[in-house]
Image (spheres, rainbow, N blue to C red):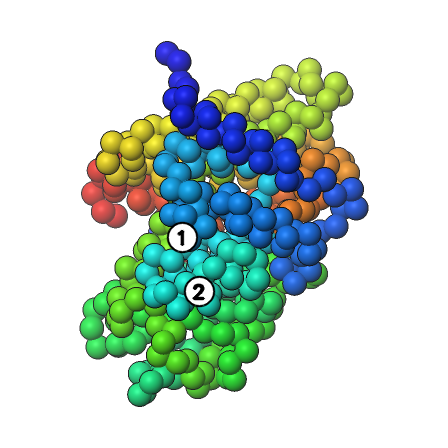
Amino acid sequence: MQLRFDEATEAFRSKFVAWLDANLPAPSTTGERPTSSAGVPSWSRAFQRRMFDDGWLVPGYPPEHGGRNAGLSEQMVYFEELAGRHVSRSLNPQGLGIVASSIIEFGDDDQRRDYAIPILRAEITAALGMSEPGAGSDLAGLTTRAVPDGDHFVVNGQKVWTSGAHDADMLLAFVRTDPDVPKHRGISALIIDTDTPGLECRPFPDLMGPDHLDFNEVFFDDVVVPRRNLVGDLNDGWRICTGALAHERAMLWVLWSEGLDTSIADLVRCVGDTPLAEDDVFLDRLGSLLIDAEALRLLGYRGLARLQRGLVAADQSLLKLMGSEGQRDVALLALDALGADALDQRKGTSVFQPWGANRGDASWFDRFLNSFAGTISGGTSEIQRNIIAERVLGLPRG
Ligand SMILES: Cc1cc2nc3c(=O)[nH]c(=O)nc-3n(C[C@H](O)[C@H](O)[C@H](O)COP(=O)(O)OP(=O)(O)OC[C@H]3O[C@@H](n4cnc5c(N)ncnc54)[C@H](O)[C@@H]3O)c2cc1C
């Protein structure tokens, strides 16, 4: 059996490759590694803007929103080309992949003009305010309260894990607007400018070290938000919320498979012709990861084929689970195999390029620590396993 894309899709790929060849900035040799979007170099913002203005940042969107109506196969080869070059499209992944796409889909023209397009053009950055101390996997249990009052809402409560909120210009926050109906039905989505009085962001460090301040607690103390900042209808936030998560999963789909491939290639390059290259135990583990990566790619193609036939691609949870845990397992193998060299940035990922806030030189140890993020954000591995058990395998609910 031969698997290949049709001629039109390959022509689309060639067009994009030609654009990348002409526009990709030279790789950074300084090893600069921004720890927040405020620290992202201006050329990185300029690159994102050029991508948008030339119709390559969000090719699946219609032209009026900066895209070129690319179909699913075209988007797939687009992401393959980006991932194969380690190119992250944006310094603000949540802003691009979730906030802007939600506003484009569910917001009004003013919100698209004032928020979505500036996010896409890297003029402003956005954070996503979903999780709370008591609401993560069970997101519908969120309690941050927004009380309608004339032409505005008054918001009180707290969010947590809000990536990049401390240097974001706005939040897309999911808030409870009706506490007296079943929990999914009383949620709304609000755009909240981060300089609004009463809003306080407190960054806190993660596993990556004390200088890596990307997570935030966000507190709301009588924060007044104009009614025009309501995205979609009042109490219709759950539809936007699930739409936003679908955007996140769609965004991750190809990237997991390509990411796993490139991580394995990085490890093979690091091992080179050292004695490890002849070590049976190492080769056995590497072979197993290569098989997983191939299975992941084929599952991705099967999901794509199903979507194109109008069927639901329930395999997305499987892709997310295998991709995120596969990244962790490659990093773990690198730690076991390379020993102290796994702490050395230069022996980690010299091919990584800091196009955006999440890219930069990283040792294999950094990559191992960072790999846990993928197994939690966008739905934890346990939640993915529940979904696979119930919706893919048809097992009874636990
Ligand atoms: C890198 C990263 C970036 C993030 N960025 C953002 C962001 O920008 N905005 C935002 O709002 N949130 C963000 N999050 C938060 C993320 O969405 C939550 O961490 C995630 O949804 C899990 O919620 P929780 O942390 O409250 O864990 P909990 O839901 O409390 O889960 C705790 C543990 O219990 C397990 N568990 C829970 N329910 C079940 C169940 N039904 N069956 C089996 N096991 C279960 C979970 O798998 C987990 O191991 C980010 C997280 C990470 C890691």
2 or 1: tag closer to the N-terminus: 1
On the image, the x and y values in percent for residue 187 come to 30, 69
Tag shown at residue 158: none
Q: With respect to residue 321, does 145 lie above or below?
A: below
Question: Can residue 322 be seen from the camera position used here?
Answer: no
Q: Quick one: 240 or 210, which is closer to the camera?
A: 240
The residue to which callout 2 is attached is 113
Q: Quick one: 298 or 277, which is closer to the camera?
A: 298
Secondary structure under the numbered disc 1 in the rendered image: helix
Q: Are marks 2 and 1 in contact (CB under 8 Å)?
A: no
The residue to which callout 1 is attached is 64
Which residue corresponds to the image point at 52% horizontal and 49% vertical from the top-left? 52
- Tell me the crowding category of disc 2: few under 14, some 14 to 19, or many 20 or more residues within 10 angstroms, Cα based: some
Which residue corresponds to the image point at 26% horizontal and 66% vertical from the top-left? 236
Q: Quarter of the image containing the N terminus? A: top left
Which residue corresponds to the image point at 62% horizontal and 48% vertical from the top-left? 47
Query: Quadrant of the rendered structure where residue 320 is?
Result: top left
Residue at mark 1: C-beta within 8 A of ligand 1: no
Q: Residue furthest right?
A: 30
On the image, the x and y values in percent for residue 38 come to 65, 63
Left or right of 314 in this view: 88: right
Amino acid type of the residue that numbered disc 2 sits on in the rendered structure? Arg
On the image, the x and y values in percent for residue 136 come to 40, 61
On the image, the x and y values in percent for residue 290 come to 53, 24
| The quarter of the picture showing ligand 1 | bottom left
Question: Can residue 222 be seen from the camera position used here?
Answer: yes
Which residue corresponds to the image point at 37% horizontal and 36% vertical from the top-left? 72
Amino acid type of the residue that numbered disc 1 sits on in the rendered structure? Glu
Q: Between marks 2 and 1, how big is the CA–CA gap? A: 11 Å
Secondary structure under the numbered disc 2 in the rendered image: helix
- Tell me the crowding category of disc 1: few under 14, some 14 to 19, or many 20 or more residues within 10 angstroms, Cα based: few
